[in-house]
Image: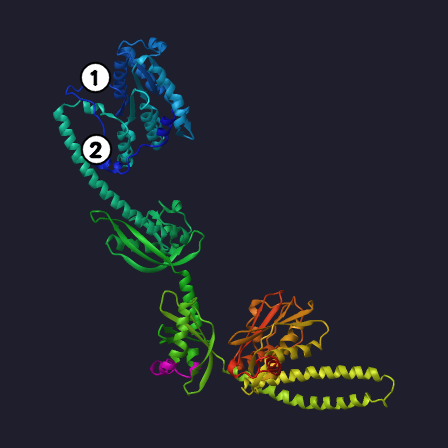
Amino acid sequence: MDDLQDQMSTPQQDNGAESRLMHEQDWALTPLSIPSTGQNTLSEHTFAGHTHVVCFSEHDASLITMLSAFLGDGLRAGDNCIVVATPSHHEHLEQHLQATGFDLAQAVATGTYIPLDAATTMARFLVDGQPDSTRFIEVIGPLIEQATQGGRRVRIFGEMVALLWAQGKQAAAIRLEEFWNALGQRYTFSLFCAYPLQDFDGRKHEAAFTHICQLHSQLVPPTSYTQLTEQERLRTFTLLQQKANTLQVKITESQAAQERLRALAAIVESSDDAILSKTLSGIITSWNSAAQRIYGYTAQEMIGAHVTRIFPPDQYEEFEQIMAKIRLGEPVDHFETRRVRKDGQELLVSVTISPIKDENGVIFGASTIARDITEQRRLEAKSQRLFASNLIGIFVADETGRLLETNQAFLDLVGYTQDEWQAEAPLAMTSPSFLASFLRPLIQSAHAGNGSSDPQETILLHKSGKALPILMALTCIEHTQTCIGFVLDISERKALEQRKDIFIGMASHELKTPVTSLKGFLGLVQRLLSQKEFSQQGNEKILQYLARMDAQIEKLTKLINDLLDVSMMQAGQLIYREEQVEVDTLVREIVENVQETTQTHRLLVQGETRTAVFGDPDRLGQVLINLLQNAIKYSPNANTVLIHLDATEEQVQIRVQDFGLGISKEHHQKIFERFYRVTDQEEKTYPGMGIGLTISQEIIKRHGGRFWVESERNKGAIFSLSLPLIQRESQVLSQEEERERMKQPNAE
């Protein structure tokens, strides 16, 4: 029984055979003999051994006739008959058998005739709507085993496969046929299955039909075929072959047409343009999803409605004018007009309308493709207003940098009239050097990026030959190879910056002289008051005040020096002296000096470089002091500042790390700009002019190094600088290194 169950659990299939059977009709079936008398022959066939017969009946009457003959012959021959059928078929079959003289009540009583309800019996071995092999054996096996006792032959009619097929469970029906075949390897019985022929719908069920025939040993043709004479059968067979060939051609053509229609439907449905069709009278017959999006009406609302539903009332005549052209076979291309959405909003659309013809070329409707250009026209009008304004210079250029169009503000900027510009000015601005060095790379950058460039400063030649400093930005125009440029005259800003730099220089010199004198006098007073002879009351208090004044003057002096450095830096006159600088010695000196000025933080040096750089020790010290003072100032709730030293074969790196407020990423580049200070309403405001980092960056840059920051808000900051090393061959050893070398035994 286990072997039988294993056979039922594995469908018996011939891979590749199904396709061959479909096309060659090479079925492994033994057709029942059909004599020329035209009588049903199922009763005349002798069933020997196990047989599995299938019939595709045209109607119930023919099925009952064949089934009555199949079972009647069995009853007369002393066979036991098991009938698994629907109540309707049981009723008609019993009437037919009783009419031919069979006492079914006696047959049922003796177990010769066993009627079973198909649905009830099948329900006993279904699991989740599918036949289960184990349960099938448990339900059907004992029935057959009992019926075969005493060596009796058994005939079975099974209608359960037909019920599964009618429920749309074709795979389950085929599975049940396989279970019957597996059971036939254990028991000997003749099984008769029947399917309504109308349940097999052409090519849709062709493969399944072939598979069912393959699972049966014999096939009973429909009754109408058995009633024909031999000559009529030949004519019918030949005619069926001709019809089959014709049908196959039509099916192929229909499939190709359906494929084209599906592709066209997919294109229509996925289009961003509204696509609709209508009759010549204007009744809408199709409406795609883009039409719903653009006009606001669903397909259910519009199909069957008149197309003028989306027309403004004052444009109803437009419909008649358009359809008059369509009736003449004339398309309407890219016609710009107005339409109305469901919510009453008016749209600007560009429509293309074409006639629809039948296979005979007769026009019976029209298709419309409409594109919403409302936003496009609004942007064009807005751009035109901007282009025509004198707020900013604007030009349009192609991808090579050739200027195609300019506005009046741009012409005023370069000093040309419109006629002069068209005649000669483009040559001045689009000179090879300007194109190669600025405009063309800017255009390429915009096209390669997000479609626009960042504002950049450059020089534009005025008609007079004067160099005009400008700020220029570009943005690409979608779906074209052109871009639009915006030009801002920054000559006034440049002049203002120059005046500011001159003012800072003058102010620094003017302030430095009296401050220096004041500091000198305060020194004299401080020395006099500190003498032993001076012992007036309040001496110590006066000394404290003087010390505080001196500290403030030191801060003022530093600020003035910083302002002077900024001014000299802008003019390119910042003074540097160049010498070999021992990095570790310089760092530790600066750290010791700054440590003496603070009681709140410990300054810890980690690592060493044992290297030297070439530069100005005072300027490099100025950078380190600025970084350390900033680290202390901006970490009020911390007590440690770390100074990391590291070196590679090519450079030395110094990092100053604090554990304070931190700096948001959007400020990382801006903090190195002149006078820039991080402003945050949630943070405490600290004194300073915002020029220390600017000066530090310039100093490091002049030394050939890099200067950067790594930080996040509330996570502290690390300011790092790197400087190129002196090549080892040319380094001069420090005195400490020299002493260490001389201590070695092999020292010369």
Quadrant placement of the C terminus? bottom right
Q: Residue at (87%, 87%) from the top-left corner?
A: 536
Which secondary structure class fits the magenta region best?
Answer: helix
Do the numbered discs 2 and 1 sit on residues whose CB atoms are within 8 Å? no
Foreground residue, 571 or 696? 696
Judging by the rendered image, the residue that carries numbered circle 2 is 26
Q: Position of residue 685 (x, y in %)?
A: 67, 71
Residue pushed farthest left?
Answer: 231
Of labels 2 and 1, the one closer to you: 2
- Where disc 2 sits, the SS reads loop
Q: Position of residue 337 (x, y in %)?
A: 36, 59
Foreground residue, 572 or 490? 572
* First along the sequence among labels 2 and 1: 2
Q: Position of residue 442 (x, y in %)?
A: 41, 74
Q: Please tell me whether residue 414 belongs to the stretch shown in magenta.
A: yes
Give the crowd class for mark 2: few <14, some 14-19, many >=20 residues within 10 Å: few
Quadrant of res 474: bottom left
Under mark 1, the amino acid is Glu
Q: Horizontal placement of 160 versus 508: left or right?
A: left
- Where disc 1 sits, the SS reads helix
Q: Is residue 374 above or below residue 725?
A: above
Quadrant placement of the N terminus? top left
Judging by the rendered image, the residue that carries numbered circle 1 is 44
Quadrant of res 102: top left
Q: Is residue 445 above or below residue 112?
A: below
Residue 473: tell me if it is visible: yes
Q: Please tell me whether residue 473 belongs to the stretch shown in magenta.
A: no
Foreground residue, 40 or 702? 702
Q: CA distance from mark 2 to mark 1?
A: 26 Å
From which residue to which does the magenta span run? Answer: 412-433
